[in-house]
Amino acid sequence: MPLHDVRRPRTLFISDIHLGTRACKAEFLLDFLRAHEPETLYLVGDIVDGWALRRSWYWPEEHDAVAQEILGKAQRGTRVVYVPGNHDEALRKYPGTWSGVEIMREAVHETADGRHLLVVHGDEHDAVVRGARWLAHVGDWGYQVATSANHGLNLSRRALGLPYWSFAGFLKRNVKQALRFLDDFERDLARRAASRGFDGVVAGHVHHASLREVEGVTYANDGDWVDSCTALVESATGRLSLIDWMQERACLLHAGRTWAVATSSPGRTPAEEPAEREREPALLASTLADPG
Ligand SMILES: [Mn+2]
């Protein structure tokens, strides 16, 4: 089924997908990716969850399809820049271009209106984050199962098919603490970007989409595809905005568009996909899962 109105924004930023975990909303992401053909796509870390894969192998068809769609975009001319996060930190050791995807520790994005944005996952520079012990576990449900006092609780949550840990849930339960932490995180990243002469920073890591001015610089966070299904987008004129894909899909469906969660590649047959590329996502995932 052809998708209506494929959007061609100048830039898309997505992060915290956590492919390789059951919590990843891969089908919504696939739907989102197929509805957008950006000039540049930034993957702002925690794309493949190497920590989770190392504990137990989980790589269903939808997760492979997401990886294939990203590689397909690179093949069709999108510039794809992958800035690894803490859950895919093994890739930080391999800067360079792989299958058309540029891997780098941090990136600098110039907007259409000439602003320079630092693009980082957000975990590595940040003393605030290291101070916040619970944040190390964001997106890392299995780790919490193994170590926390909630062991029994998490086991029963797993039996019910629920994610072990959710930032949205944490936010609801600990509003004051979470908001204070988020504010510290945002200020710290914004100050670091400003001190290096940037006009702003784009990050992920905290699973909380945000776009605001902090002490004269732009702080943007593209959110996640575990709880919220959000992305940051730059228009042709350089305007930044956040996309809440669950909300937009609901509106599009309401407006009678034939937008549906895609289960097969629209307009392309498998024969058009280079065969040697097909094994790459699983190969990448197994590399990340390899403790060596
Ligand atoms: Mn992270």
Image (cartoon, rainbow, N blue to C red):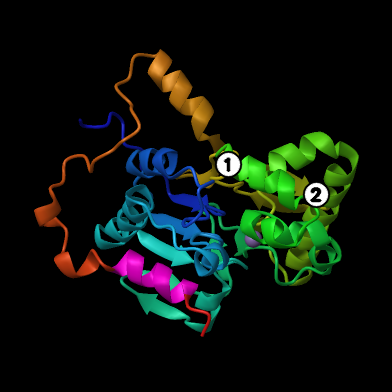
Secondary structure under the numbered disc 1 in the rendered image: helix
Q: Is residue 79 left or right of residue 221?
A: left
- Mark 1 residue CB less than 8 A from any atom of ligand 1: no
- Tell which residue pokes out farthest to the left in this image: 271
Q: Residue shown at 44%/26% (left/top)?
A: 249
Q: Quadrant of ligand 1?
A: bottom right
Can residue 199 be seen in the rendering of this structure?
no
Cβ atoms at labels 2 and 1 below 8 Å apart: no
Q: Is residue 16 left or right of residue 62?
A: right
Question: Which amino acid type is shown beneath numbered disc 2?
Answer: Leu
Q: Residue shown at 23%/43% (left/top)?
A: 265
Q: Residue shown at 34%/71% (left/top)?
A: 283
Secondary structure under the numbered disc 2 in the rendered image: helix
Which stretch appears magenta? Answer: 280-289
What whole-number distance in Å separates the C-alpha atoms at marks 2 and 1? Answer: 31 Å
Disc 1: which residue: 159
User: Looking at the picture, how far across and down is residue 67, in whole percent?
Assistant: 36, 57
Q: Is residue 167 left or right of residue 94?
A: right
Q: State whether residue 145 is above or below residue 130.
A: above
User: Looking at the picture, how far across and down is residue 220, in whole percent?
Assistant: 66, 50
Question: Which amino acid type is shown beneath numbered disc 1?
Answer: Ala
Residue 287 inside the magenta-drawn segment? yes
Disc 2: which residue: 182
User: Looking at the picture, how far across and down is residue 57, in whole percent?
Assistant: 45, 63
> Which badge, 2 or 1, comes first in the chain's sequence?
1
Can residue 94 be seen in the rendering of this structure?
yes
Which quadrant of the rendered structure holds the N terminus? Answer: top left
